[in-house]
């Protein structure tokens, strides 16, 4: 999964990027930057930490997430009149989820109005794509043979419906789409259709006092970008001690990724064995067949059945052999819907 950090200038995106990835990109930078900062981080997962000593595998593979520090609106100061630059919009279209970073660490901050401003810009960016495309389709319709018209008209009518939604200030993620419509729209990369979460960049004081956080109407996590970007530079043991001192139970990275998974409706399943203990990311509701395909299309092609056990059951039993004896290992078919944290073994005849 790729998560794009966006927001107003100086909301703390680059600071947050450093906090989340351990990178050291420049902060307080307001010059032109058309390429996002990117870094891949492993998804912290305590269940993998538990499974590894149980199987003592040759290697452990965590799921990974890519963060992109996409940058902010064009400041009115540098000749722009607000709005995201074209290059940044293009970068944002390529991520799977947007994390809107809002500065809240100063008493004068206004995260709610900042959020409105960002959402408006996303809305306008999508509207402009739709309007250009509709113009194009109108022109195409005139010169198209009758046989192709129905398809063009279907796209026109769908885009008109989406335009109305945006004009009412509603993001596209609120629109119910059929499978075909979704497929038709996939290539557009509409920003307001993407899963979204808010990272509230708070001060140390606010972090202690979670109750004062504003309700922004979107899934929100509060992280102190400044503190956690410093902690991200420490050795793990020192970092843990520092977090404990501050009363931070789970570092920002854990909470941000967990929320991103939830907003994107993603879950994890695990594979275990002497070779490898590994986390895999799938869409919630995926079938055993789809889960198998994330590992290898051949495994999916030859799939006969899946052996499945819940993480808690495996831990309770103490191992796979014990779990089998206790009858905790289930055999499921191809259409079985895999649940979060299940350990799966796919029986395939290829
Ligand atoms: N005091 C304080 N300053 C911060 C915090 N986060 C960011 N800043 C400062 O705000 C400025 C802009 O931060 P930066 O991460 O570059 O923002 P960006 O433009 O959104 O990437 C920098 O000078 C940071 O040091 C914070 O949590 N507390
Ligand atoms: Mg920055």
Image: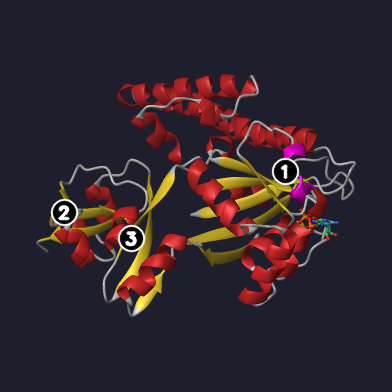
Q: Is mark 1 within 8 Å of ligand 1?
A: no
Residue 154 left/right relative to 304: right
Instruction: Label 3: state its secondary structure.
Output: helix
The image's mark for residue 230 is: none
- Residues drawn in magenta: 206-212
State whether residue 91 appears in this view: no
Quadrant location of the C terminus in the rendered image: bottom left
State whether residue 149 appears in this view: yes
Looking at the rendered image, the disc whose residue lies closer to the viewer, 2 or 1, is 2
Decide which of 108, 310 is in the foreground and name it: 310
Instruction: Label 1: state its secondary structure.
Output: helix
Residue placed at 65% from the left, 52% from the top? 5
Q: Residue at label 3?
A: 315
Marks 2 and 1, Cα distance to the nearest angstrom? 44 Å
Magenta segment includes 211: yes
Decide which of 171, 281 is in the foreground and name it: 281
Quadrant of ligand 1: it is bottom right
Q: Is mark 3 within 8 Å of ligand 1?
A: no
Instruction: Label 2: state its secondary structure.
Output: loop
Residue placed at 78% from the left, 49% from the top? 11
Q: Is mark 2 within 8 Å of ligand 1?
A: no
Report x, y in % for residue 82: 80, 40
User: Which badge, 3 or 1, is on the more N-terminal residue?
Assistant: 1
User: Which badge, 2 or 3, is on the more N-terminal residue?
Assistant: 3
Q: Residue at label 2?
A: 327
Q: Is residue 109 above or below residue 60?
A: above
Magenta segment includes 222: no
Quarter of the image holding residue 197? top right
Decide which of 45, 201 is in the foreground and name it: 45
The image's mark for residue 210 is: 1
Q: Are marks 2 and 1 in contact (CB under 8 Å)?
A: no
Q: Residues within 10 Å of mark 2 (few under 14, many from 20)?
A: few
């Amino acid at each position: 999964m790729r998560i794009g950090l966006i927001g107003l200038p100086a909301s703390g995106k680059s600071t947050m990027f450093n906090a989340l990835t351990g990178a050291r990109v420049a902060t307080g930078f307001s010059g032109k930057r058309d390429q996002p900062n990117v870094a891949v981080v492993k998804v912290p997962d305590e269940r993998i930490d538990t499974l590894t000593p149980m199987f003592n595998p040759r290697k452990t593979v965590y799921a990974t997430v890519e963060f992109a520090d996409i940058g902010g609106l064009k400041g009115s100061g540098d000749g722009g009149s607000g709005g995201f630059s074209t290059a940044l919009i293009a970068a944002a279209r390529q991520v799977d989820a947007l994390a809107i970073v809002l500065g809240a660490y100063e008493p004068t901050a206004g995260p709610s109005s900042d959020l409105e401003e960002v959402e408006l810009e996303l809305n306008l960016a999508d509207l402009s794509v739709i309007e250009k495309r509709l113009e194009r389709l109108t022109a195409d319709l005139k010169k198209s043979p009758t046989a192709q018209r129905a398809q063009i008209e279907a796209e026109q009518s769908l885009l008109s419906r989406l335009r109305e939604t945006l004009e009412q200030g509603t993001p596209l993620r609120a629109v119910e789409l059929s499978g075909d419509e979704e497929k038709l729209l996939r290539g557009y990369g509409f920003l307001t259709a993407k899963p979204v979460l808010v990272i509230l960049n708070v001060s140390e004081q606010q972090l202690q006092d979670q109750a004062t956080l504003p309700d922004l109407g979107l899934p929100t996590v509060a992280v102190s970008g400044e503190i956690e970007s410093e902690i991200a530079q420490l050795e793990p043991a020192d970092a843990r001690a520092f977090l404990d001192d501050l009363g931070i139970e789970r570092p920002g990275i854990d909470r941000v990724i967990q929320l991103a998974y939830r907003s994107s409706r993603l879950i994890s399943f695990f594979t275990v064995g002497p070779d490898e203990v590994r986390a895999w990311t799938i869409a919630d509701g995926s079938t055993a067949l789809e889960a198998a395909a994330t590992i290898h299309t051949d495994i999916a092609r030859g799939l006969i059945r899946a052996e499945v056990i819940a993480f808690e059951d495996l831990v309770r039993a103490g191992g796979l052999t014990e779990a089998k004896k206790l009858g905790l290992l289930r055999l499921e078919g191809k259409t079985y819907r895999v649940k979060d944290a299940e350990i799966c073994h796919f029986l395939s005849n290829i």
